[in-house]
Image (tube, coloured by chain):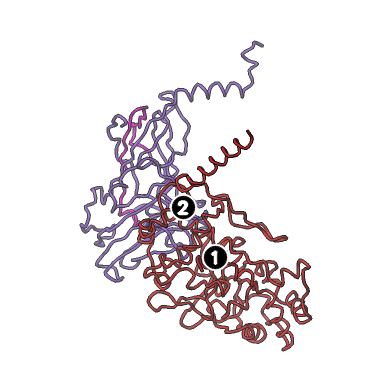
Amino acid sequence: MNEKDSLPPAHLSAVVLAGFRASAQPGRVRVQFQLTIDGQPLQPGRQYADPFGEPYTVERLRFYLGHWKFSPGRPGISPAPPPTDYPADPAGGDPSGYFLFDSQDSATGALTLTLAAGRYDSLSFLLGVDSLHNVSGAQTGALDPIKGMFWTWRTGYVMAKLEGSSPLSKLPAHRFEYHIGGFEGKNNVLRTLRLGLPPGQQLEVRPGMVSGLLITVDCNAWFGGTLPGTRPIHIASIPSCTEPGVLARQIAENYSTMFAIKEILPGRAAP
Amino acid sequence: MKWTLALFLLFFAGLGWGLGPQAPHPTPLPFVTPPGWPTPSYNFRNNPLTKEGFELGRKLFYDGILSRDGNFPCASCHQPFAAFATLEHPLSHGFDNQFTTRNAPGLFNLAWQKEFHWDGGVNHLEVQPLTPITAPNEMAGDLPSIIGKLQKDSAYRRLFREAFGEGPVNSQRLLKALAQFSVSLVSARSKYDRMKKGELAFNQYEQAGYLLFQQKCASCHREPLFTDLSYRNTGMSADSVLKDKGRMRITGRKEDSLKFKVPSLRNIYLTAPYGHDGRFPNLSAVLDHYATGIVQGPTLDSLLKKGIALSANDKFYLISFLGTLTDTAFVKDPRVGEPGR
């Protein structure tokens, strides 16, 4: 038995980890969002048709994202950092760790994440605000209730909302409003979504560089009915959903299908 | 030599004092749990009590700046002399001559509550003020304009900085300051409390009432908070206008229809009228309800199926006992009253 074999496993892994850490300089990735309908970029104010042919206009879409994890590409090709929780870092770091997309605020069209250098072929994130942040009192940053995504009558965040108008809506001014929340029990609407890069492609994250990723957000997904597990939501019969419950959970199932990675954008040198 | 050193140190201590507003070091404020009481539910670690934070919360509580037209501070419905309930109002009055939809509860011993409102819909003390501040029939404010008003006010900017350090006036700091004030409202100096400590004795009526209370009321109005913080249907039919289903609105469960939080009985002489909609004008009406007025229904509390048998004397003794829960030292405590009064 030589001396090498007698190294305790813990010691060995410490050496490996130390070596790994030294090589894992972080890089950054800028994730950009693009609203679409039927694969085309959404034009504000224009009337579209939902999957059932109902005409509608989007006024506002908002959603919370957090708990980003990037999974490495195939082993052997690249350094393989383990999937890690990367807090959203829009505009130099949000104290809440969350990112709020707001279609009416162009400053929220993208977020930047700092993560270990390497090659990645998939990512995941939480769509919504985790239960802990719904029960821990006053929050700030993206979770500040001033953002209009907080229920006061029944504590909890609105995880996502879609508002607009449709001539078929029976509500005043033909509006429709879906405010989706609920963080506990069987009608919990929190969803962790996993998105793969286009086949054969990997996102390369390098120190000193900001890589880019374009994610499309399909508004029509909210109405469901085209993919298995979704429920058709007709604006004519269901123009609103404003509290947690079965309907909210079903709409959450619908909108959980709205994201797709469209392409890797050209990287640029970090500022 | 020693004197020189002492003077030298004093000089610098004085300098440090003078630097206070620039480099604030808020003074820690202890929270005292009355002997024998449970551990508070409020997590002080995320919002350590300080003199400056408490005083800021106190000022905000009494300031109309948190309401749309300036007329409705928190204290307009939570009056200190009524143990922070609304004196003699079944429903309180809010913005533009509107009524609230439920009776304003007294505010005290909130540190031991995990859920707020009659239906328990609010899960944390810090976010509770958002409801009355933004409700159109209460303070009718909106958060962006309130934060804007506070940010423009140089006195508030200074007070926020002294309480929480550098950084913006934001809703989190506003809510934490309000929580520091409201969580400090501890009522534990009533005649009952002094009797428990052996400082004085009940008279014979109070003592008889206490024994009755322990037999007939204490399973829900559990000592020392005088509530078990549960939700129960106490046999009150829904008001035909309000149609309030209570806890069911929050849980969506039929089993919770007409259930409301068991209110504390502390300071009950000061918080009339009673019931979630203030329908009982006085304590006699409440006891009459339990004795003969219970409305049967599928969610009626199992302890109330037959009502509570109470003779005329029982009611008199019980009401005598309930008077021992009045905490005058608390409601007249200048530390929680309106600043500058």
Is A222 colored magenta in this rendering?
Answer: yes
Q: Above or below — where is A218 with respect to B252? A: above
Asked whether residue A245 is in view, the answer is: no
Q: Above or below — where is B5 with respect to A162? A: above
Looking at the picture, how far across and down is residue B295, in whole percent?
60, 83
Which residue lies under the disc numbered 2?
A139
- Chain ID of residue with mark 1: B
Which residue lies under the disc numbered 1?
B116
For the colour red, the matching chain is B
Name the side, left or right, on which B16 lies relative to A167: right
Looking at the picture, how far across and down is residue A110, in whole percent?
32, 43
Magenta highlight range: A196-225
What is the secondary structure assignment of the residue under circle 1?
loop
Distance (Cα) linking label 2 and label 1:
18 Å
Looking at the picture, how far across and down is residue B98, in whole percent?
41, 78
Instruction: Determine if marks 2 and 1 fall on one subunit.
Output: no
Looking at the picture, how far across and down is residue A89, in whole percent?
39, 41
- Chain ID of residue with mark 2: A
Name the side, left or right, on which B289 lies relative to B117: right
Q: Identify which amino acid the numbered label 2 is placed on.
A: Gln
Q: Above or below — where is A65 with respect to B206? A: above
Query: A204 or B111: nearer the eye?
Result: B111
Is A173 colored magenta in this rendering?
Answer: no
Q: Colour of chain A?
A: purple
What is the secondary structure assignment of the residue under circle 2?
loop
